Amino acid sequence: MKILVVGGGGMIGGDAALRYKAMGHDVTIAGRNAPQAGTPLGNLPFLKGNYIENSFDKADLAKFDAVVFAAGNDVRHIPQDGGDDYWRQANSIAIPRFFESLKVAGVKNAVNIGSFYPQAAPQLVEGNAYIRSRKESDEGVCALADGNFRSMSVNAPFVLGAVDGLIIPMFVAYVQFGQGKLGLPETVPPGGVNFISCRSLSEAVFGAIERGVPGTSYLVGDENLSFQDYFGLFFEAAGRPKPEVKDEEMALLPDVAIFFGRGNTLYYEPDAEENALLGYRRGDIKAAVQGLYDQYKDM
């Protein structure tokens, strides 16, 4: 299968690209900038383009049997002068427009990797422009599905995982926090959320390509963990006791990144039938943290 992974230079798209390549598929990654040459991702074919600017050539898109979209914008991407309208332009408008380009180009299978918030916490949609944009992009993608275009969304919670050759500064900091190298207070906020590994998410997305129902929004997830238990896995990997809980903002997980509010939990159990249909593994978080620790422990 010829697969294009948009956003394939990042953690989520990069894991999918390398995993599908290892399965024997013909994988190309797309984005604004090519990954570093000589790395596993840099060795894959690259298609330059910017979905927000609608700059992909439909003739290029037509070459692929399936497209995985892993380039949706979140709080890490918003420019300093961006506001609520940025989310509307980047997610609500640009993502469905890109999927419409795929449909016009004749691509048969297209999966949007979206966010869990609109399904796991629908009460947050009205008051949060980012979450609303994720809901609208998801709905726009699914509305395009028909007998010839199998578009759908796979919506993920907090994602983690090591990608060969890719340095992810956030997880470098988490590993160093667990090692006691950062000089920060060894405390974490109360509350918790659902987590999923890159590996499980890549499996779910491939399951959607092969067996998913067009027009469906799949809420995926793995383990519900308190922030103490989650960061505690990095401490455990370093052979140290887990951090204490303290009800104050954490530098490595600022309040702006906890849309459901510090001290609260956003736990859920993914649908068992959907889990079986998509065929993704569960219970993979400890292994994912260990993989991150092994990759970054000497940095």
Image: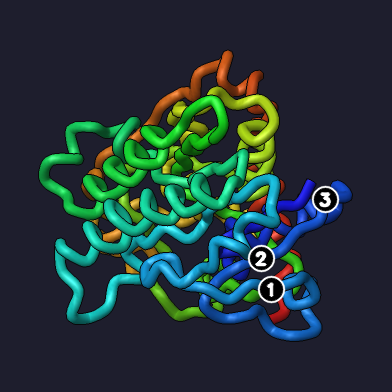
Q: Which mark is residue 63?
A: none
Toward the viewer: 293 or 7? 7
Q: Is residue 115 left or right of 172 when viewed as pictured?
A: left
Residue 61 visible (yes or no): yes
Residue kind at label 3, given as amino acid type: His
**Residue 129 coordinates in the image, percent (x, y):** 18, 53
Disc 1 target residue: 46
Q: Is residue 122 left or right of residue 242?
A: left
Q: Tag 3 or tag 1, which sits nearer the N-term?
A: 3
Please, what secondary structure does the residue beneath circle 1 have? strand
Residue at 61 percent of width and 39 percent of height: 109
Q: Is residue 50 above or below residue 107?
A: below
Vertical arrangement, residue 28 with respect to residue 204, above or below: below
Q: Whole-percent x and y of residue 255?
A: 25, 59
Q: Which residue is mark 2?
A: 29
Q: CA distance from mark 1 to mark 3?
A: 15 Å
Within-10-Å neighbours for mark 1: few <14, some 14–19, many 20+: many
Furthest toward the bottom, the residue is 37
Residue at point 40% right, 45% down?
Answer: 115
Q: Nearer the viewer, residue 30 or 36?
A: 30
Question: Of 58 and 39, which appears nearest the observer?
Answer: 58
Residue drawn where x is 46% and y is 32% of the image? 145
Compute the Cα span from label 1 to label 2: 5 Å
Q: Is residue 171 left or right of residue 286?
A: left
Q: How many marks?
A: 3
The numbered disc on residue 25 is 3
Q: Is residue 273 above or below residue 223?
A: above
| Disc 2 element | strand
Residue 138 spot, x, y in % from top left: 37, 40
Name which residue type carries label 1: Phe
Q: Is residue 11 visible?
A: no
Say if mark 1 contacts mark 2, CB within 8 Å: yes
